Amino acid sequence: MSRAVPQAPSPAVRRARAVLVVAGAGLVAFGGWTAWSTVPQGQWLSALTWLAGGVVVHDALLAPVAVCLGALLLPRVPPAWRAPLRGGLLAAGALAVLAVAQVAGAADRRHWSVVPQDPAVAITTAVLVIGAGVLLGVVVGVRRRRRGAAPPPSGRPGSTPPPR
């Protein structure tokens, strides 16, 4: 069985990637400068502890759960659902990390402006938006396949094991 050799990206794709890399680097620099200039000196230890905790939670909890879900769930769903579910699960994992911070901030707030809205409403809205994005991805993928367009890279044969 022969495997297709991946083609080099087109010049337009290379330019788009370069723009995204430069924009991302600029946003990282802006975030670093903002943190450096606004976090009071007395709070640096708790901020760094929070960041280190995020790495530990990712490596010990989120990454293994993502691998297990990918290995157990994705092969059992129709191919049209696989790529949208990958994106939805990734977004849900990021939402889980952000939700912890929002719920913790709301539970310990000393002033209403710290977390001005009910976290449950914000988190529920985000989950609904992620679900709508998954459904939209399925619809777009099915329409693309019906028109005979090439499947997206994540839909290549062999990219996911067949169901058992």
Image (cartoon, rainbow, N blue to C red):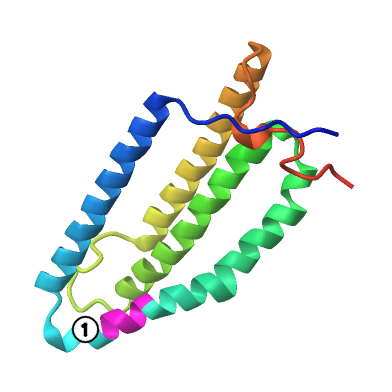
Q: How many marks?
A: 1
Asked whether, in this view, residue 35 is left or right of residue 50, the answer is left
Q: Nearer the viewer, residue 73 or 17?
A: 17
From what the image shows, is residue 158 above or below residue 104?
A: above
Residue 45 seen in this snapshot: yes
Residue under the point 51% across and 59% down: 93
Q: Nearer the viewer, residue 91 or 23?
A: 23
Please state, as top left, top right, bottom left or bottom right, where the N terminus lies in the image. top right
Asked whether, in this view, residue 111 is left or right of residue 126, the answer is left
Question: Residue 74: x and y, percent?
Answer: 72, 46
Q: Is residue 83 magenta?
A: no
Q: Which residues are magenta?
A: 46-51
Asked whether, in this view, residue 15 is left or right of residue 73, the answer is left
Residue 113 seen in this snapshot: no
Q: Main secondary structure of the magenta part?
A: helix
Asked where in the image residue 37 lies, by quadrant, the reply is: bottom left
Residue under the point 14% across and 65% down: 33
Give SS at disc 1.
Answer: helix
Question: Residue 9: x and y, percent?
Answer: 48, 30
Residue under the point 60% across and 18% down: 144
Q: Which residue is mark 1?
A: 44
Question: Residue 111: x and y, percent?
Answer: 17, 74
From what the image shows, is residue 70 above or below residue 138?
A: below
From what the image shows, is residue 97 above or below residue 47?
A: above
Q: Nearer the viewer, residue 77 or 25?
A: 25
Question: Residue 53: x and y, percent?
Answer: 42, 79
Q: Amino acid at mark 1?
A: Trp
Q: Residue furthest right?
A: 164
From what the image shows, is residue 51 above or below residue 18?
A: below
